Image (cartoon, rainbow, N blue to C red):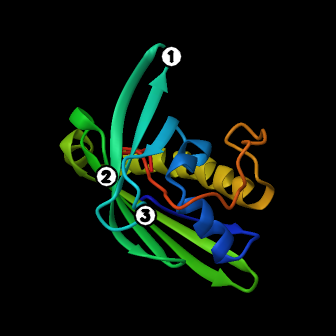
Amino acid sequence: MAVRHQLIRRPPEAVWAVLADGSRYADWVVGTDSSRPKDDGWPDVGSAIAYTVRVGPYSAEGDTVVRLCEPLRRLELEARSGALGTARIAIELRPWGDETLLIVDEHPLRGPGGLLHNALLDALLQLRHRAMLGRLADLVENGTGSAGEPSGRPATGGQGTATPAPGTP
């Protein structure tokens, strides 16, 4: 199973502020080059963010739709990446004293990822999640972006959040 947790040394409100900012996903989601809200409602149920994934000279577009939102507690997303299929990404925040235990559970739903879902894919997702959650923790705790550089935006940014396609929360 592609479930991973990370202790973030900030309260759930600080973590949620980053998750609720759809323009910040590229700062912490591994493989995402940019993200932007598609509408004003992020992270309301049904709202979406668009994202771009780049690998060398190639790029692909996708979007992520909010399927469940319980502010400060839970965000469930469906990342859609065209021919690659879709993935379900559940993000849970648990208060842990003055800190937050964040749990991410990602599973392919449709397309090749869903058909080919196996232990190897889960192992790759585990590696990706390790890096992704480390970036998110750094962003929330220190206000730095995915490369460890200041992002130019406060770590407790706007409203929206999104997660990229299968293998891209």
Label 1: how many Cα within 10 Å (few below 14, some 14–19, many 20+) = few
Disc 1 secondary structure class: loop
Residue that carries the numbered disc 2 in the rendered image:
87
Q: How far apart are the two marked residues, 3 and 2, measured between alpha carbons? A: 17 Å
Residue 12 shows in this picture: yes
- Separation of marks 2 and 1 at Cα, in angstroms: 23 Å
| Relative to 97, residue 105 above or below | above
Closer-to-camera residue (130/98)? 98
Q: As shown in the figure, which amino acid type bears the numbered disc 2?
A: Ala
Q: Nearer the viewer, mark 3 or mark 2?
A: 3
Q: Is residue 138 left or right of residue 43?
A: right
Image location of residue 152, percent across then percent down: 74, 42
**Which residue does the image show at 30% across and 39% down from the upper left?**
81
Residue at mark 3: 43
Q: Residue furthest bottom?
A: 97
Q: In the drawing, what numbered circle is on residue 29?
A: none
Q: CA distance from mark 3 to mark 1?
A: 30 Å
x then y, percent, for residue 69: 40, 73
> Looking at the picture, how far across and down is residue 163, in whole percent?
44, 51
Q: Which residue is mark 1?
A: 56
Element type at mark 3: loop
- Compare marks 3 and 2 and give the one earlier in the sequence: 3
Quadrant of the snapshot with the N terminus = bottom left
